């Protein structure tokens, strides 16, 4: 866990592309919101593996948003329930239900569909917000915090040595 | 392209996927076992043991071996256990969110067997401990059978007795009326006064009247006397009215007092349910315990299953509730060959009980029968001890109604050492008997209707009755070679009414009812004697009062009559007549003198 956090900080402070980190966070949000072993999550994880996104950020993002998903589950389920039981969408879902892939993806489950739809809608703004925040962080916050004595004390800690080790390993990498 | 794609990622993905699949493959059995134990422990609230779980993936087939579920009320025993349960699951449908089991087999299912080691109990539900079984209640009732007749002294000291209340009311009325009558007596004309009136009127009769003026004066004197006793007559009239009202009131209250013991007895009979103390109570205690025991088992099974059989509409409400964590649900849409969410197409259970070995076959077991249009069927058979057969069907409708019916029959079944009741007052067990019977039931929307007939032949009983009544009961039962019991159950499933009749009723009618009637009669005499004693005091008061009233009434009548006589006296007329006679005599003498002179 500490290694992952160190990797994230390294990515935020280092040379990793802002877009790679923001995309990792957005995709982590999409995956974290749904139950882990669903068909669409497996496909997203596949793409995360082959597209150059920051893996450490992605894993942390999945962990964080899974916790958030647990807390928001009643609302996620309500969204799924509303969509699947809406008379206006009944024909649309009945047509989709005839495909095995739809059933295999469990999109006829209120939680899975609610999470997928909310994740799909919100991952785009989350991408742009993350990009903006990381950019601001690199310009203002990093240099602002570096001035504090506590940060200097932290630099002398075990965590910082781990951080520098990670930074050394992944210079310019993921 | 390589700027965006890292091809080595594919290797990573494949490696991770392979790792997960391998872990699932090698640890699936352990995970499933832990899952079953955790879920069952949460449902039953006590230790659950599973010896092993076997999984085959193609086709998906799961076997649970050696499962034991501790009875949380009796941790030394299991609620149930079985040797092996195996189910073939449709994997494809499972991925779609449905559990379709082609065949479920459960071997050597046993209920209430002893455990090798005491099972742990999770959570301590105090309310469960407080629940008293019907059996306990029945046992507690029997020892009190002889004591059900209440204590005579305490009944007679009860201030709510009508006899006591009526007596007190009569006494209070007596005192009130007494005061009123005493006041009246003081105002009544005395004997001296009456004599005074009589003397006065008598004196008028002796007055010598010589002229019409004298008559007019006499009449005026008489009218003056009449005016005097007119006031007295009004007092007497009022007194008569008061005496009549007092007489009526006291007569009514005396009647109430006289009727009070009968009313009190009726209330005592009702309060202590003395009129229902007959042989049917014993039939309920003896066979009701057994009947309710069987019914409670069926009810328990229904209650265990019922929460999982709710219609999908119920679940939607659950989802909408604002819980901390919601799990969601599958929504199923129309398709060509629809299937229920859970379906066991065929099941076969073998069960070992004290009563013998049973085979339970089930088909189309589900809670959504409308998808396939078939009812669930359960057939229970046993041939190890005579023949027993039960056929039942049930279904849930799309609107959530539950409908079930079935029938059973039994032949040539030997019963040995079956305890009917075991209490301080009576221990009774059926040493042996040959049993046959048949019955049926229907259950619609939580209302049950069931009729059952059981006949026992070649019976022999063992036991002992420690009270007079239970001894008679025991002797009567022991003398019977044949016994029939009819049990009807109807009403709401949660609290049904049991109606139990038996040939034992007729057998007991003579001996037992006579005893009860004798005991009741003795008790009734004691209570009535006590009530009459209380009544006697009140009635004595009442009688005294009545005698006094009668005396007073006679006095008033006499006085009134005397005054009336005086009032209607013809003293004036008498004197008038006397005067007329005198005038006539005078005229006659005068005429005679003149005629003498003329003819003389």
Image (cartoon, rainbow, N blue to C red):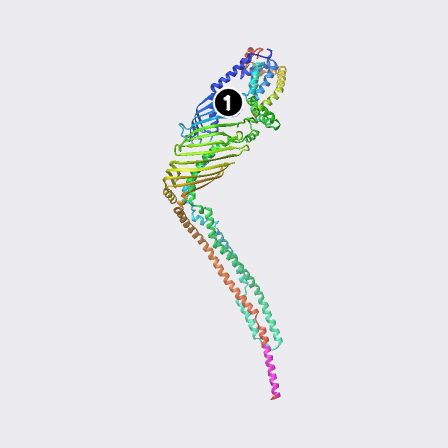
Q: Quadrant of the C terminus of chain B?
A: bottom right
Q: Position of residue B590 (x, y in %)?
A: 61, 83
Q: Dividing the picture into quarters, in which one does residue A134 lie?
A: top right
Q: Position of residue A62 (x, y in %)?
A: 56, 19
Picture mark count: 1
Q: Position of residue B325 (x, y in %)?
A: 55, 26
- In the image as oriented, which residue stretches furthest toward the bottom? B600
**Vertical placement of B467 versus A58: above or below?**
below
Q: Quadrant of the N terminus of chain B?
A: top right
Q: Measuring 42% from the left and 51% from the top, which residue is drawn there?
A: B525
Q: Position of residue B379 (x, y in %)?
A: 45, 32
What range of the chain is rendered magenta? B578-598
Q: Dividing the picture into quarters, in which one does residue A60 lie?
A: top right
Q: Is residue A153 visible?
A: no
Q: Dividing the picture into quarters, in which one does residue B133 lie?
A: top left
| Residue B522 lies in the magenta-colored region | no
Q: Measuring 52% from the left and 14% from the top, which residue is drawn there?
A: B15
Disc 1 crowd, CA 10 A, few/some/many (<14, 14-19, 20+): some
Q: Which residue is mark 1?
A: B91
Q: Secondary structure at mark 1?
A: helix
- B387 relative position to B9: left or right: left
Chain letter for mark 1: B
Q: Is residue B588 visible?
A: yes
**Vertical placement of A157 versus A115: above or below?**
above
Q: Main secondary structure of the magenta part?
A: helix
């Amino acid at each position: 866990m500490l290694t992952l956090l160190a990797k994230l900080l390294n990515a935020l402070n280092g040379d990793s592309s802002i877009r790679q980190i923001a995309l990792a966070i957005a995709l982590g949000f999409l995956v974290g919101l749904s139950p882990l072993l669903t068909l669409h999550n497996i496909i997203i994880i596949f793409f995360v593996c082959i597209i150059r996104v920051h893996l450490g950020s992605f894993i942390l993002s999945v962990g964080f948003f899974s916790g958030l998903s647990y807390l928001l589950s009643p609302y996620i389920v309500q969204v799924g329930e509303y969509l699947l039981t809406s008379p206006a969408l009944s024909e649309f879902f009945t047509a989709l239900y005839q495909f095995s892939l739809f059933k295999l993806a469990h999109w006829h489950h209120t939680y899975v569909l609610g999470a997928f739809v909310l994740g799909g809608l919100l991952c785009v703004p989350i991408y742009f917000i993350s990009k903006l925040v990381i950019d601001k962080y690199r310009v203002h916050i990093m240099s602002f915090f570096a001035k504090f004595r506590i940060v200097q004390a932290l630099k002398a800690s075990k965590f910082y040595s781990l951080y520098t080790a990670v930074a050394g390993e992944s210079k310019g990498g993921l | 392209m390589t700027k965006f794609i890292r091809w080595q990622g594919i290797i990573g993905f494949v490696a991770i996927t392979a790792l997960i699949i391998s872990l699932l493959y090698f640890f699936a059995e352990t995970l499933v076992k832990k899952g079953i134990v955790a879920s069952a422990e949460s449902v039953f609230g006590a230790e659950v043991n599973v010896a092993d779980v076997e999984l085959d993936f193609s086709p998906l087939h799961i076997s649970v071996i050696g499962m034991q579920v501790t009875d949380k009320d009796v941790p030394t025993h299991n609620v149930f256990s079985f040797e092996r349960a195996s189910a073939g699951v449709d994997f494809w449908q499972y991925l779609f969110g449905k559990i379709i089991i082609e065949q479920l087999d459960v071997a050597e299912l046993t209920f209430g067997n002893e455990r090798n080691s005491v099972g742990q109990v999770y959570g301590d539900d105090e309310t469960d401990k407080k629940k008293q079984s019907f059996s306990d209640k029945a046992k507690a009732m029997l020892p009190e059978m002889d004591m059900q007749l209440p204590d005579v002294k305490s009944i007679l000291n009860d201030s709510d007795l009508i006899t006591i209340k009526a007596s007190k009311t009569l006494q209070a009325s007596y005192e009130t009326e007494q005061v009123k009558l005493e006041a009246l007596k003081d105002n009544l004309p005395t004997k001296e006064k009456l004599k005074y009136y009589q003397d006065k009127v008598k004196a008028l009769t002796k007055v010598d009247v010589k002229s019409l003026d004298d008559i007019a004066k006499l009449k005026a004197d008489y009218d003056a006397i009449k005016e005097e006793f007119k006031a007295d007559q009004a007092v007497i009239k009022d007194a008569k009215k008061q005496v009549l009202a007092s007489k009526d009131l006291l007569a009514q209250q005396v009647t109430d007092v006289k009727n009070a013991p009968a009313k009190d007895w009726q209330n005592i009979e009702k309060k202590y349910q003395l009129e229902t103390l007959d042989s049917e109570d014993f039939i309920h205690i003896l066979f009701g315990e057994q009947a309710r025991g069987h019914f409670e088992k069926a009810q328990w099974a229904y209650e265990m299953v019922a929460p999982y059989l709710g219609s999908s509409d119920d679940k939607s409400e659950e989802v909408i509730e604002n819980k901390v964590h919601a799990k969601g649900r599958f929504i199923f849409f129309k398709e060509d060959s629809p299937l229920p969410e859970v379906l066991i197409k065929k099941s076969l259970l073998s069960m070992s009980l004290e009563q013998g070995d049973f085979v339970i076959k089930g088909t189309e077991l589900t809670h959504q029968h409308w998808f396939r249009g078939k009812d669930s069927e359960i057939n229970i058979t046993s041939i190890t001890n005579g023949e027993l057969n039960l056929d039942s069907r049930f279904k849930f409708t799309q609107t959530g109604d539950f409908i079930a019916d079935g029938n059973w029959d039994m032949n040539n079944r030997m019963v040995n050492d079956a305890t009917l009741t075991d209490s301080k007052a009576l221990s009774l067990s059926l040493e042996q008997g040959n049993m046959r019977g048949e019955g049926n039931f229907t259950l619609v929307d939580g209302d049950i209707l069931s009729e059952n007939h059981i006949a026992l032949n070649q019976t022999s009983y063992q036991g002992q009755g420690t009270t007079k009544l239970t001894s008679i009961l025991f002797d009567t039962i022991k003398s019977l070679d044949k016994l029939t019991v009819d049990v009807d159950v109807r009403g709401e499933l949660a609290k049904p009414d049991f109606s139990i009749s038996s040939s034992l009723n007729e057998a007991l009618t003579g001996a037992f009812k006579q005893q009860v009637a004798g005991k009741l009669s003795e008790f009734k005499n004691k209570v009535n004697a006590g009530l009459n004693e209380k009544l006697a005091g009140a009635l004595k008061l009442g009688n005294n009062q009545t005698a006094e009233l009668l005396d007073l009434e006679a006095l008033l009548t006499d006085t009134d009559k005397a005054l009336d006589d005086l009032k209607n006296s013809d003293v004036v007329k008498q004197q008038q007549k006397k005067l007329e006679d005198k005038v006539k005599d005078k005229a006659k003498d005068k005429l005679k003198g003149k005629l003498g002179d003329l003819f003389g």
